[in-house]
Image: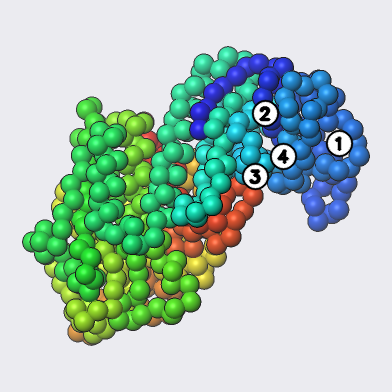
């Protein structure tokens, strides 16, 4: 999708569709049943005149995601005018604007419209959204909305939006860099979603390594991919314990970004869970919904996408991404409940449940990152169903061993507009993962399952500042939303890119 900025008067732009935000500026909350006070967030008198009748009729209220399409609006050069509701003005933020841009794209796609112009909400910007943040939100939201997962339908319709113009006030030149950066981030998020969307027969560990290598060559990263021999040579017993049950060879993927001028004392390590299909192993999952387990490599896909973005954005900080990719299969070679595996760090692990495999491969991935000299670690994984029980499908779970590092990430997360919630890592939870026969067990049981999984990983991050993102409930949209299709979401990529760029500053 081509993206451009314009400082033209909205009513004078020739476009297939002009999109304008409508906010409800009534003072009371919806629970108090106050009469809506819809406000067209555009100072162009011709635009306000064109919508006067539909506003006064009560048809337009400003309710979130409410859409009203007008054809051949009087006084405008645009062929159509789309009014998109943004909800209460007092609650409007860049996060809501991002979703509105996605909703506009998805509304227009269905009507086979190929290009449109989005007028930034002027009053909204004045009320607290900096212009560069508004531009970023619209670009990111539009790209996310433009993605559809129906790759393999023989009758798939090409309904992509080809061009987006954003109307800004004043000189657009200072906002060009914000637009270009947000485009890189948005394209990388969709790159991640593309990886997650692939079925497991088209995204084996070997294929994932090939996709990572191809991407690295395109953007100037160093990429190394190793197989079973290297994994055994490194004594990654936890990783190999999961991989040994599959006929598909595992892959240890290492992506390196080493810019000139980077600080010598900071080396960020990004570790991703890359289970390209998870049957649960011998502790096999129920058949219902198992087809979705192709998404169990979303953490790995996120880290690969993050590396793409930072290679193009070029922050001055050293970053290494480590992806442990494998299938988890129930063959005659598979590990069994009761087995003991020796991790790369030397810790012994009693296997209680072979479906708690993600923490095993991450354990060796975290250890390897430390061996490579990483000073700060972040892992991302579709790790536990327990985090879905705790937070539903709305928030990803954050665990952090270091408060200062958490604050850095929380600031990045706020800027990115992704929903996440911090969960505890109190020492008392460590009792849950004690083993009678080994150092630790790989499953602490039903209660506090997301926390016990994080406590397990903390054993391998050791004293290195570390953040764990459990994205099991948010990496896959269970149903379509007005701004995003059902399927892979690309969660955490924007936050991680902001986090990395923050170290550069």
Nearer to us in this view, 456 or 10 = 10
Give the residue number, with chain letter if any, for mark 3. Answer: 110
Q: Say whether disc 2 or disc 1 marks the residue closer to the N-terminus.
A: 2
User: Who's the residue at 74% across and 43% down the image?
Assistant: 67
- The image shows residue 272, relative to residue 329, as above or below, that is above
Q: CA distance from mark 2 to mark 1?
A: 22 Å
Q: Residue 412: where, in percent of width, then height?
A: 45, 42
Q: Would residue 183 be found to the left or right of residue 431 on screen?
A: right
Q: Quadrant of residue 202?
A: bottom left
User: Tag 2, which secondary structure?
Assistant: loop
Q: Quadrant of residue 16?
A: top right
**Residue that numbered label 2 is attached to:** 16
Disc 4 and disc 1: Cα gap in Å? Answer: 12 Å
Left or right relative to 406: residue 257 = left
Residue 94 circle label: none
Q: Which residue is mark 1?
A: 55
**Where residue 227 sits: x, y (%)?**
15, 58
Left or right of residue 436: residue 44: right
Q: Secondary structure at mark 3?
A: loop
Instruction: Indicate which disc, 4 or 2, sits on the residue closer to the N terminus.
Output: 2
Residue drawn at the location 51% of the way across and 45% of the way down? 147
For label 2, the crowd category at 10 Å Cα-Cα, with few meaning under 14, some 14 to 19 and many 20 or more, is some
Foreground residue among 438 and 67: 67
- Percent of width and height locating residue 121: 68, 30
Q: Closer to the camera: disc 4 or disc 2?
A: 2
Disc 3 crowd rating (10 Å Cα; few below 14, some 14-19, many 20+) is few
């Amino acid at each position: 999708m081509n993206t451009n900025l314009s400082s033209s008067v909205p009513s004078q732009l020739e476009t297939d569709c002009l999109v304008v935000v409508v906010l409800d500026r009534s003072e009371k909350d919806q629970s108090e049943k106050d009469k809506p006070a819809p406000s067209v967030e555009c100072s162009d008198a011709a635009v306000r005149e064109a919508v006067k009748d539909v506003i006064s009729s009560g048809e337009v209220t400003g309710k979130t995601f409410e859409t009203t399409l007008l054809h051949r609006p009087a006084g405008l050069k645009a062929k159509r005018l789309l009014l998109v509701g943004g909800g209460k003005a007092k609650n409007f933020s860049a996060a809501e604007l991002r979703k509105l841009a996605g909703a506009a794209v998805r509304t227009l796609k269905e009507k086979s419209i190929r290009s449109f112009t989005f007028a930034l909400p002027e009053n909204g910007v004045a009320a607290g959204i900096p212009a560069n943040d508004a531009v970023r939100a619209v670009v990111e939201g539009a790209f996310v909305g433009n993605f559809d997962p129906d790759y393999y339908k023989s009758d798939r319709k090409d309904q992509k939006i080809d061009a987006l113009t954003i109307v800004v006030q004043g000189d657009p030149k200072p906002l060009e860099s914000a637009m270009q950066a947000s485009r890189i981030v948005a394209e990388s998020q969709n790159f991640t979603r593309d990886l997650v969307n692939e079925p497991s027969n088209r995204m084996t560990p070997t294929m994932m390594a090939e996709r990572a290598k191809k991407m690295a060559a395109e953007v100037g990263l160093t990429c190394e991919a190793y197989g079973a021999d290297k994994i055994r040579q490194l004594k990654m017993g936890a990783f190999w314990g999961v991989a040994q049950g599959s006929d598909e060879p595992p892959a240890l993927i290492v992506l390196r970004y080493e810019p000139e001028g980077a600080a010598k004392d900071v080396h960020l390590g990004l570790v991703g869970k890359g289970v390209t299909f998870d049957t649960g192993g011998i502790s096999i999952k129920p058949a219902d919904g198992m087809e979705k387990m192709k998404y169990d490599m979303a953490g790995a896909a996120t880290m690969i996408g993050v590396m793409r973005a930072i290679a193009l954005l070029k922050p001055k900080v050293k970053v290494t991404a480590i992806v442990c990719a494998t299938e988890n299969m129930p063959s005659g070679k598979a590990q069994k409940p009761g087995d003991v595996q020796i991790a790369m760090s030397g810790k012994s692990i009693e296997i209680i449940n072979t479906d708690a495999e993600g923490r095993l491969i991450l354990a060796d991935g975290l250890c390897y990152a430390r061996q490579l000299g990483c000073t700060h670690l972040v892992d991302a994984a579709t790790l536990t169903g327990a985090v879905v029980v705790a937070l539903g499908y709305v928030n990803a779970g954050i665990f952090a061993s270091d408060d200062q590092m958490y604050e850095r990430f929380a600031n990045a997360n706020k800027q990115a507009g992704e929903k996440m919630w911090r969960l505890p890592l109190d020492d008392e939870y460590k009792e849950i993962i004690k083993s009678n026969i080994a150092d630790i067990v790989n499953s602490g049981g039903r209660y506090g399952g997301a926390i016990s999984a994080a406590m397990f990983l903390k054993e391998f991050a050791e004293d290195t500042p570390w953040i764990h993102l459990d994205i099991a409930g948010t990496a896959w949209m269970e149903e379509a939303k007005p701004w995003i299709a059902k399927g892979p979401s690309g969660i955490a990529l924007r936050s991680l890119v902001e986090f990395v760029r923050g170290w550069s500053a």
